[in-house]
Amino acid sequence: MKPHSTAATSIDDYIASFPPEVQVLLEEVRQTIRGAAPEATETIKYAMPTFVLNGNLVYFGAFKQHIGFYPVPSGIAAFKKELSAYKMGKGSIQFPFDKPMPLDLITEIVKFRATENFERQTAKKMKSI
């Protein structure tokens, strides 16, 4: 699907490497994540857009027929029922291009992951005291 094989160095570069109709979907997902975790920072990890907040929060990327969303296994497990309509792996979800992006669900998952990361970070700090 990518028109060239150069590795993106920013989420803007990553999104720009796709056709316009896919760019729209990627930007919707990006803005949804930003809205759910405004203090998260953006980066590229594993050649995919990544949001980081007290550790890796979520990843996403475009493929031939879907947007892949990666909230790690705990994010999938917590929303298993809500995600049952989508193809899933251990830590991934496929949102097909031909269906509306479930932006409200993405928001809920990102907020869950932000809380989870915060609690894990706080527990680590408490152990070191």
Image: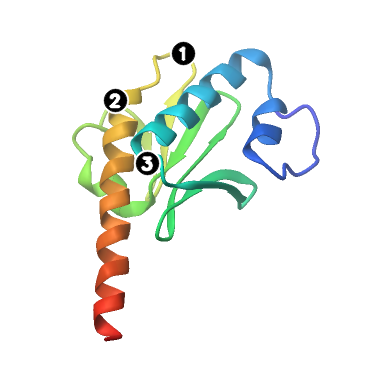
- Packing grade of label 3 (10 A; few <14, some 14-19, many >=20) is many
**Residue depth check, mark 3 versus mark 2: number of the one nearer the observer:** 3
- Picture quadrant of residue 69: top left
**Residue depth check, mark 1 versus mark 2: number of the one nearer the observer:** 2
Q: Distance between the residues labelled 1 and 2?
A: 17 Å
Judging depth in this view, the residue of 64 and 38 nearest the camera is 38
- Packing grade of label 2 (10 A; few <14, some 14-19, many >=20) is few
Q: In this view, does 47 lie to the left or right of 96?
A: right
| Amino acid at the residue labelled 1 | Asp
Q: Which disc, if any, is residue 98?
A: 1
What residue is shown at x 60% (from left), y 26% (from top)?
A: 64
Q: In which quarter of the image is the C terminus?
A: bottom left
Count of numbered circles in the view: 3
Q: In this view, does 25 lie to the left or right of 95?
A: right
Q: Which of marks 1 and 2 is nearer the N terminus?
A: 1
Q: Where is residue 101 in the image (x, y as percent from the top left)?
A: 40, 20
Q: Mark 2 points at which residue?
A: 104
What residue is shown at x 33% (from left), y 53% (from top)?
A: 73
Q: How far apart are marks 1 and 3 (CA)?
A: 27 Å
**Residue depth check, mark 1 versus mark 3: number of the one nearer the observer:** 3
Q: Mark 3 points at which residue?
A: 37
Q: Is residue 113 left or right of residue 78?
A: right
